[in-house]
Image (spheres, rainbow, N blue to C red):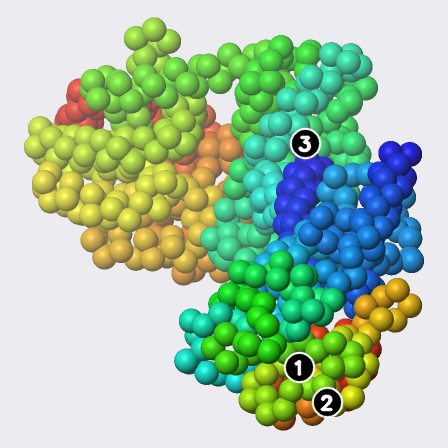
Amino acid sequence: MSQFAAAGAALLVAGCILLAYQFVALRTTLTDDVTVQAAIIADNVAASVMFHDQDAANEMLRAFRPSPFLASATVYDGHGAAFATYRNGADDAAPLLLRRLPMFAPVSVAHPITYRGTQLGHVVLRAHTQGIRAAMLRYGALVALASLGAMLATSLVTRRIKKRMRRAEGELAYLAYTDPVTDLANRRRTYEALEAAIAAHAAHGRPVGLLLLDLDNFKVVNDTAGHAAGDRLLRQVASVLRATVRPSDHIGRIGGDEFAVIVSPLEQPGDLQGIAQRILEGLRHPLQVEGLEVTATASIGASAFPNDARTMSELLSNADAALYRAKGNGRDNVALYEPAMIQAAQRRANLERDLRRHLDAGLLELAYQPQYGCASSAPVGVEALLRWPHPELGYVSPAEFIPLAEESGLIVELGKWVLERACEDAVALQRDTGIPLGMAVNVSARQLRDPGFIGTVEQVLDRTGLRPDRLELELTESVLMEDIDGAVAFMHRVRALGVRLSIDDFGTGYSSLAYLQTFPINHLKLDRSFVRLLPQSGTMIAGAVIGLAHGFNLTVIAEGVEQPEQLEWLRQAGCDYVQGFLLARPLPFKALRALVLESAAAPA
Amino acid sequence: MRIVRLASTAVLLAAAALTAAAQVPEAALKAAYIYNFAVFTTWPADSALQKAPFAVCAGTDSALWPGLQTLNGKPVNGRSWLAADLQHPKGGRCDIVVLSGGAERPAALPAGTLVVRNGPGRGPAAITLVDDEEHIRFDIDTQEAARNGLRFSSRLLRLARNVL
């Protein structure tokens, strides 16, 4: 609007200047014309004045009747007396007010009458300004019309520019606040919405719920089927979320495979569980992604404001802690926030920090659990087990700190340290006792994907001088199944070094016998969960695994043997090796050395 | 109101001026006319006459003689007006010859002489002054003027009563 006013004012000023100029030009022209006419009259009337012939003078003046502007012409003789007069009969039709304006006053011109240097009198001409007024009126109308047209054009152009700007701003806002893959709100917008929902709590007093959702298998889909498939999966998940939650709730994608649902207003915090369950159920329907049938499962952490948290950041970290718990609970489930989770998260953060420090400080230890042939009492090998004697917390379970090391990437360094130490100890044990034992070392998923790991194994063997076939790398079945092609390639490279391979916890996950055939492994490990049931039950599975392994020409080792009956059954079933508390607990290196020396001294 | 008063004043003044003009004696007025004729007439070029007085010849006994004499010394085309006796003109030549109504035209007037006759009469004259209802008018004979090598201004012709 102010732009309009400015343009209007500018046009008004320009119009006034143009009108003023036009007026001056018109009046000057009129004055010039009248002056010329006065000169002509003066010239023509000279003889009449000299001969006092008034008739001739009047006749001559009447000749100027057609002049459009001449109002009157009067000839004065040398004495100043009126000699002849002409008056235009037409009256000035302009209103008196206009006529009285100085600018529209009649133009009056006096011109001397001379003949051969003698002044005979003078002529006075008066011209009315009707023509000027009419011309000014027309010109003013033209200027007004042009200004109006200009304003109209300007307003049209301005409107179009503004429209375009609004559209561009809209697009920018959309890009800044929207996740381009799923069309959901992005992290920034989601956080803003959460802030707004929390602010609204002050108004209506009802709680705000926050669900953090993390896809369990997104990485697998992305890695195996490609990014396009990953994007399709994300869009499908987004549509499931849209279909499940209320329209008033807010959905956002806040990370690679992380989604957030803001439930506001929430009737009561207990409702979050139901909403989260409905989302998980919606996801359980298999989705078609690039021709593959994928079942997306997710872990959901839930937290409510103000019941669980007093601030937005607290709410977010609480929901995150609950999400962590849900994942820890085996995925595809929901965890509601409990205060203990934050303590657990705190503990995790502390442990991760300490683990790094203690690894550098050399506080970690290895314990070795001997492995025996079913028929002999002398150990044939050991499994290296990592121990962390924390100065304040006591021994921290590997089940607690290994996942932390996997998450933080510290596992690569940790794994390298374990491998080196185990190989050094194996060499030292043989040197001290003269008895060569196999050394089994566990390999984590992260190490398997680490392209430098094979090189590390090679270097360690080289440096310690351990015979490659004395080293055995244990892989877990679930790790292998995550990326079968990569795992098979890895195993072939390991086998090419001469290092032996075994599969840990066989039979507990989704194993495929077809794959078992293609894996270049030496051992199968019968999981402790099967052994524990022996000999009362579980014999079918244990027997089948042993039979299967032998069918594939693999040796079998049973772990977790604690009862003599279990050992007896395994011996009967043809199991090759055993390990467990019944035979020996995990021992520090010195105790292991003593055990080996002792068993060597004892008669077989 | 004021405009109306001014206008009426102007009309009164104009009327007074007209009355004054009418009171000028007829003979003096005719002399003035003759002077004006001279002003509106072109004589054939004659460099010998550049410095000579402008001779206006009339009978000393004519009615116009005093009026013509009062104009002595007035400039006419750069020369000086001089009233002269028609019988004995100075230098033997006249630029204008003024004849009374019935008077005979002198024989053998040289070319370049303007003959003005006061009132109707016989014999050719380039200009004839006529009294016409209290107005002084004049007739012009352009053929006679042309014979004498004279040319009149169109302004003069326009004011004439008759032009032959």
Q: Position of residue A324 (x, y in %)?
A: 54, 26
What is the secondary structure assignment of the residue under circle 3? strand
Do labels 3 and 1 touch, CB within 8 Å? no
Q: Quadrant of the N terminus of chain A?
A: top right
Could you give the CA–CA distance between mark 3 and mark 2, rounded to whole angstroms? 132 Å
Choose between A495 and A530: the one closer to the eye.
A495
Q: Does residue B130 appear to the left or right of A103 in the view shown?
A: right
Query: Circle 2 sits on which residue?
Result: B124
Q: Please give the label number shown on residue B115.
A: 1
From what the image shows, is residue B25 above or below residue A192? below
Quarter of the picture containing the C terminus of chain A is: top left
Q: Are marks 3 and 2 in contact (CB under 8 Å)?
A: no
> What residue is disc 3 on?
A261
Q: Mark yes or no: residue A204 visible.
A: yes
For the residues carrying marks 3 and 2, which lies nearer the camera in this image? 2
Q: Locate residue A356, reporting x and y percent.
A: 29, 22
Residue type, label 2: Pro
In the drawing, does residue A213 fall left or right of residue A104? left
Subunit ID for the residue under disc 3: A
* Of the pair B120 and A403, the residue shown nearer to us: B120
Q: How far across and down, in percent of the image, does residue A201 sit?
A: 74, 15
- Residue A556 visible: no
Q: Mark 2 vs mark 1: which is more N-terminal?
A: 1
Q: Chain of mark 2?
A: B
Residues flagged by tags 3 and 1 on a common chain: no
Q: Residue at x 68, y 18 (%)?
A: A198
